[in-house]
Amino acid sequence: MSWETISFDCYGTLVDWEAGIVEAFQRAAAEDGHQLDPRLIVSAYHEIEPQVQSAGTYRPYRAILEEAALQVAHRLSWELESGRAGFLAESLPDWPVFPDTRKALERLGDRYRLAVLSNIDDDLLAATLREIGVSFDWTVTAQQLRSYKPAPAHFREAIRRAGAGGARLIHTAQSWFHDIAPATQLGLAAVWVNRKGEPAGVGRRPLHTVAHLGELADWLTD
């Protein structure tokens, strides 16, 4: 297949969101004299954030981050004051970009159109993309659609923007739950970036699996 566009999830695929979240929680908790276990922060966030996203009607991602921060802090016995829950959104532009991201995107951008599908607000994503330092042809955000992955709206919009019924679009992501499962269910070609060597989830298998973005660039530029 001759692909024309590669779409990417951002946080977890291009950006090390776990490291960013851990650092933000530890820094904020230390101001209150608390020391938080990184593993417990990540496991609690993995569970709580999707629940907050799917509860009720659409809310901006800043509000999701604030509510998730409060619930994670409570789970970890840190009684965070609601007025300070914005620390997580404020930290987001500083979440570290994976070391392989920029070089791989520059290689891919010489041959393909690049896009981002992200569960985030436009301004927060813009700050991250400035940090990545690579131009994308278009972005699809939760703010634009008032919807969060794994709901299908992001992928349907990506198919519309890519044209040709999505036949020349390939989606690349780390999260099986948020991206790989819903993308493949809609018939999109997908590449799973399995950085941690995790077992596959439920549903259709992706077209290809890579351990990092450099491996993706090698596969798509041979």
Image (cartoon, rainbow, N blue to C red):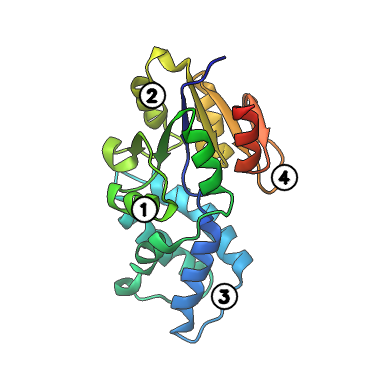
Nearest to viewer (mark 2 / mark 1): 1
Residue 5, position in %: x, y? 45, 26
Q: Residue at x 35, y 76 (%)?
A: 81
Residue 161 is at least partly visible in this image: yes
Q: Secondary structure at mark 2?
A: helix
Residue 98, position in %: x, y? 55, 53
Q: Are marks 2 and 1 in contact (CB under 8 Å)?
A: no
Image quarter where the N terminus lies is top right
Nearest to viewer (mark 3 / mark 1): 1
The alpha-carbon separation of the residues under discs 3 and 1 comes to: 30 Å
The alpha-carbon separation of the residues under discs 3 and 2 comes to: 39 Å
Image quarter where the C terminus lies is top right
- When asked about the image quadrant of residue 157, the answer is top left
Circle 3 packing at 10 Å, graded few (<14), some (14-19), many (20+), is: some
Q: Which residue is mark 1?
A: 130
Q: Which residue is mark 2?
A: 156
Mark 3: which amino acid?
Leu
Q: Which residue is mark 4?
A: 197
Q: Residue at x 38, y 38 (%)?
A: 136
